[in-house]
Image (tube, rainbow, N blue to C red):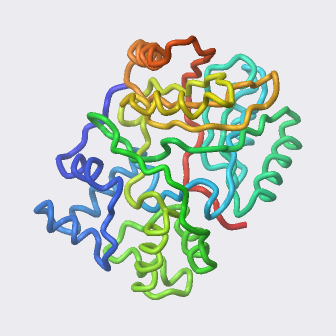
């Protein structure tokens, strides 16, 4: 897959505003002033990125399991059933990510989110009933590197994996739920969102800033879709690591720039013993496989692992934090 043509302004937006989006009444005007463009030109560039599917939304990325609950899940089905089952999974409002990965028994991988764990369980139960298939539930145990933004060129930015300082209050929950589909691409987006949730523009900005300072929101900015940018060789690599060794193995893997996401999940018995997960987003399959070998070389002892390349993205949206 070839990378799409991006204007100089769009490259600036993707490189500079995947995080630290201006929390001001007219954020696009602030960006325009910094880059030497007009406010209308910045908004139009963002609209084009969204229309072409290069960005999924513009808004906050919430730290997992702070303002709501989530889990990674895998659905078992046969190859000829994948399209039908993926359509059922994507149709569930609680599912915000849904991918096909290279696995003979578990080809459909998705993330289920909700305001609490009971809502996530209800989503999984509905999908089991609707598909008649087994679903593995693989909840997050610990994050080591999650959603630091996506570097178009060069290494990812350093990641703060400290837990949130507190849980969100009711006003913050209401605002974050309203932002699950992102900010509107208009001159005063915070005023528009405020009108939806009963807050004025200044209250939206100060509330959002408070969630960032508390570590509830990891970043505010453009959320990039990797595949339209030419990163089609994306692999989820899973490792079977003894519990006492997981943190030290993760620490060794964090030194590799190729690792864009790294986290620990609860295994699912003998059928799915893998506990440590790394994502590598690449343009070339052979390069990604070489990066996995380099990753394993960081530890003296061999580690059982499996590489699951993504083949299709069925759905990618913001997390659903409201019933």
- Quadrant into which the C terminus falls: bottom right
Choose top left, top right, bottom left or bottom right for residue 81.
top right
Q: Is residue 311 visible?
A: no
At horizontal 33% and vertical 27% (from top left) the residue drawn is 2
Q: Position of residue 30 (x, y in %)?
A: 22, 70
At horizontal 27% and vertical 68% (from top left) the residue drawn is 28
> Eyeballing the image, is 208 above or below 233?
below
Q: Residue lying farthest front?
A: 244
- Quadrant into which the N terminus falls: top left
> Eyeballing the image, is 264 above or below 304?
below
Q: Is residue 184 visible?
A: yes
The answer to whether 2 appears left or right of 320 in the picture is left
Q: Position of residue 128 (x, y in %)?
A: 85, 41
At horizontal 62% and vertical 20% (from top left) the residue drawn is 102
The answer to whether 36 appears left or right of 308 in the picture is left
Q: Position of residue 35 (x, y in %)?
A: 14, 60
The answer to whether 255 appears left or right of 243 in the picture is left
Q: Nearer the viewer, residue 70 or 320?
A: 70
Q: How many marks?
A: 0
At horizontal 57% and vertical 19% (from top left) the residue drawn is 307
> Eyeballing the image, is 271 above or below 225?
above
Choose top left, top right, bottom left or bottom right for residue 183.
bottom left
Q: Nearer the viewer, residue 158 or 15?
A: 158
Q: Position of residue 319 (x, y in %)?
A: 60, 56
């Amino acid at each position: 897959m070839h990378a799409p043509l991006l204007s100089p302004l769009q490259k600036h937006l993707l490189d500079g505003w995947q995080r630290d989006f201006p929390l001001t009444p007219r954020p696009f005007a602030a960006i325009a002033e910094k880059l030497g463009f007009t406010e209308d030109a910045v908004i139009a560039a963002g609209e084009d990125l969204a229309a072409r599917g290069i960005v999924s939304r513009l808004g906050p990325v919430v730290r997992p399991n702070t303002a709501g609950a989530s889990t990674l899940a895998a659905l078992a089905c046969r190859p000829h059933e994948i399209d039908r089952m993926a359509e059922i999974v994507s149709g569930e409002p609680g599912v915000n990510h849904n991918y096909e990965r290279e696995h003979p028994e578990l080809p459909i991988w998705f993330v289920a989110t909700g305001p609490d764990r009971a809502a996530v369980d209800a989503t999984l139960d509905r999908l089991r009933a609707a598909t008649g298939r087994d679903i593995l539930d693989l909840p997050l145990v610990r994050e080591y590197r999650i959603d630091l933004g996506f570097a178009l060129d060069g290494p990812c930015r350093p990641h703060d994996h400290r837990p949130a300082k507190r849980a969100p209050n009711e006003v913050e929950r209401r605002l974050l739920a309203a932002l699950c589909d992102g900010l509107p691409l208009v001159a005063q987006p915070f005023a528009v969102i405020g009108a939806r949730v009963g807050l004025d523009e200044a209250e939206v900005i100060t509330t959002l800033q408070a969630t960032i300072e508390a570590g509830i929101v990891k970043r505010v900015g453009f959320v990039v879709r990797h595949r339209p940018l030419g990163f089609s060789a994306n692999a989820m690599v899973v490792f079977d690591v003894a519990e006492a060794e997981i943190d030290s193995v993760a620490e060794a893997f964090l030194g590799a720039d190729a690792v864009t996401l790294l986290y620990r999940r609860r295994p699912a018995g003998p059928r799915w013993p893998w506990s440590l997960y790394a994502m590598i987003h690449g343009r070339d399959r052979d390069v990604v496989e070489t990066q996995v070998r380099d990753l394993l070389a960081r530890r003296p002892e061999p580690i059982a692992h499996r590489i699951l390349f993504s083949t299709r993205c069925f759905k990618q949206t913001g997390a659903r934090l409201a019933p």
